[in-house]
Amino acid sequence: MTKITEHLAKLNHRVTTAVTNAGRSENCVNILAVSKQHPASVVESALIAGLTDFGENHVHEGIEKIRLAGNKATWHFIGQIQSNKTRQIAGYFDWAQTVCTARIAERLNNQRPQHAANLQVCIQLRPSSAPERSGANSDDIDDLARTIARLPRLDLRGLMIIPLPGLDDAALRQEFRRARQIMESMKQYSDAVDTLSMGMSADLEAAIMEGSTMIRIGTDLFGQRNR
């Protein structure tokens, strides 16, 4: 048994327990393996272990792994999207989870290659009371969702959030609950909306209790990152 297989078995047990405790249906939560700052070799091992979805924060590092893995994996960009990187994200990745503005959405749409399937998009929600953090304000989500839903090369899939660190369980659950409510309201703009990307190693139980459909896991799968 490889380390990744061992780690995945433990993670699957946590997820199954959390889903049961939340009274949710089996297989309702997908694992996004965050492979950033790990060598490309771990992706191959993770694929063998049964993982299929991988998240990268850095464009060039992600593209190197995408070229090596071919079409065996589904690739999610989960870092801050800069205007000068949209062409590469649109050209190589399958998902962009951190769309915050209409301008970025329009660039991704216009730069998506014609031969490629539509880019799957989540809006990143800014944490409550954190104007300095990345993400769209909750008051702007409706307009942004409406814009994305109209763009022909993008599919609006849902919402992603990274809560502020250090929240107690009650505050964390409240933040996740707010995200779920906003994601549900986005369904009026697209029938494809089905994804609530929230929860990491330390808080996946709270995220699943509040409706997460995708958890983003790095260290608990791959160990400490290379620096």
Image (cartoon, helix red, strand yellow):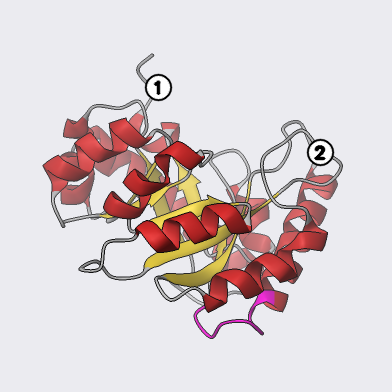
The relative height of residue 174 versus residue 29 in the rendered view (above or below) is above
Residue type highlighted by circle 2: Pro
Q: Which mark is residue 224?
A: 1
Badge 1 or badge 2: first in the primary sequence: 2
Q: Residue at x 54, y 78 (%)?
A: 150
Q: CA distance from mark 1 to mark 2?
A: 30 Å
Q: Nearer the viewer, residue 108 or 96?
A: 108
Q: Residue at x 46, y 74 (%)?
A: 26
Q: Residue at x 27, y 62 (%)?
A: 113
Magenta range: 186-193
The relative height of residue 141 versus residue 199 in the rendered view (above or below) is below
Quarter of the picture holding the N terminus: top left
Q: Is residue 192 magenta?
A: yes
Q: Nearer the viewer, mark 1 or mark 2?
A: 2
For residue 148, which quarter of the picture?
A: bottom right
Give the x, y percent position of residue 94.
Answer: 33, 58
For residue 3, which quarter of the picture?
A: top left
Could you tell whether 145 is left or right of 28 in the image? Answer: right
Give the x, y percent position of residue 125.
Answer: 69, 53
Query: Which residue is disc 2 drawn over?
Result: 131
Q: Main secondary structure of the magenta part?
A: loop
